[in-house]
Image (cartoon, rainbow, N blue to C red):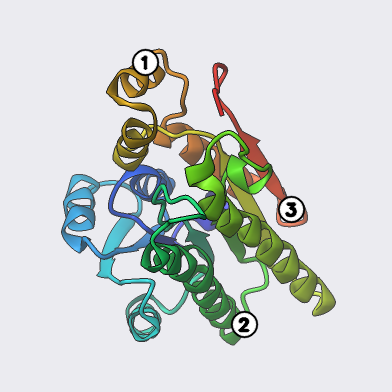
Amino acid sequence: MERWRGRVALVTGASVGMGEAFCRALVKHGMIVVGCARRVELIEKTAKELEGETGRLIPMKCDLTVKSEIESMFRAIKDQVGGVDVCVNNAGYLAPQQLLGGDTDTFQKMLDTNILGLSIVTQMAVQSMKERKVDDGHIIHICSQTGHRYCREIAAMHFYSATKHAVKCLTEGLRACLRAEESMIRVSTISPALVDTVLARQWVEVEFGKEKMEQLFRRRQCLLPEEIADNLIYILSAPPSVNIRDICVGGVLDPL
């Protein structure tokens, strides 16, 4: 990680859960981290806790479903720190909705966040790298195990799963585009199973009931955000000539 010291990483969805863990890990490895989310006050709290570390965390408010806010954020990044060297597309929206009878407004929010927002951020991050002739940058998409398989047994996951399959396709498309340009910018995904976050606990409780939720998280049939952050550091620690394309992470007692 020494070569990333002092360089700039953008982490979306940085207020809680995996996004917060990513920010903490990158700052401790000496990076300047721009953390964005709608609840910027939570990132400001994390930034205060990280004062004195080798790197630093810069909180920015951004709703990834609003293109003008993404554009404004990238202008602020350019003005304050020059541009982006690493982009971690972590922001995602999950709501248990069945295809038949599901709320279409919720479907739209998942599309806007998980696919369109990710695509706009990626486009602008790569543009930022190219403008500054950064040829060793890294784009990392946080995908999901549900992006690798069809969850037949959980009907409420089908639409969300479709958005994560799209992330996999977009990742391969981005890699192909960069390869055609003979760019050394690398592209990776991390695909975790169930991760212990507030949103995950809420979703499991709604879908399976409180008793099942407590059982899953009590028995550690899940992953911790810090464990996914370890995988992020592993990817970034690889030599510039090595591209770790995808890490699929499951718990020992992973039920999904």
Left or right: 110 with respect to 146? left
**Up-down relation of residue 209 to residue 12 (above or below):** above
**Cα distance in 3D space between marks 1 and 3:** 37 Å
User: In which image quadrant can residue 252 be found?
Assistant: top right
Expressed as whole percent of the image width and height from the top left, the position of residue 28 reads 38, 44
Q: Nearer the viewer, mark 1 or mark 3?
A: 1
Number of the label disc, if any, that sits on residue 51 = none
Q: Residue at x 37, y 68 (%)?
A: 105
SS assignment at label 1? helix
Q: Amino acid at mark 1?
A: Gln
Name the quadrant containing residue 140. Answer: bottom right
Mark number displayed over residue 243: 3
Q: Nearest the camera: 98 or 51?
A: 98
Is residue 233 shown to the viewer in this render?
no
Give me the residue at 74% from left, 53% from top: 243
Residue where numbered disc 1 is placed: 215
Going by the numbered disc 3, the residue's amino acid type is Asn
Spatial separation of the CA atoms under disc 2 and disc 1: 48 Å
Residue 56, located in which quarter of the rendered image? bottom left
First-in-chain label (2 vs 1): 2
Q: Secondary structure at mark 3?
A: loop
Residue under circle 2? Answer: 130
Residue 132 vertical position relative to residue 163 in the rendered view, above or below: below
Q: Residue furthest front?
A: 101
Residue 250: image location, x then y, percent: 58, 29
